Image (cartoon, grey):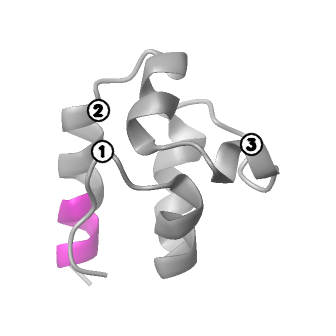
Amino acid sequence: MTEVTKDMLIGDILDADVGTAQFFLNMGMHCLGCPSARGETLEMACQVHGVDVEELVADINAYLASK
């Protein structure tokens, strides 16, 4: 995976690197396996869970870059 953006689907991010699940779990998104969660964009999930999407994108990309 190159870089995560806010319009990417959560399912695609998880499929590319299962280690990213920690970021979704930390924001209170515990239904990562359900079809509706996997089909949400990162931005949509952040809106629902009250998380700053730009901060989450930066955190996930930093994690991916460190691997």
Look at the numbered discs 2 and 3 and tell me whether their residues touch, using CB distance below 8 Å.
no
Q: Earlier in the sequence, mark 2 or mark 3?
A: 3
Left or right of 8: which side holds 64?
left
Quadrant of the image for the N terminus? bottom left
At which x and y percent is residue 63?
Answer: 27, 66
Query: Label 1 vs label 2: CA separation?
Result: 7 Å
Instruction: Count residues near mark 2 (Cα–Cα under 10 Å), then give few for <14, some for 14-19, many for 20+.
Output: some
Left or right of 58: which side holds 33?
right
Instruction: Count residues near mark 3 (Cα–Cα under 10 Å), then give few for <14, some for 14-19, many for 20+.
Output: few
Look at the numbered discs 1 and 2 and tell me whether their residues touch, using CB distance below 8 Å.
yes
Q: In the figure, residue 25 lies in which quadrant?
A: top right
Residue at point 51%, 32% (across, down)? 45
Residue type (three-letter) at the residue carrying disc 3: Ser
The residue tagged 1 is 6
The residue tagged 3 is 36
Q: Which residues are magenta?
A: 61-65
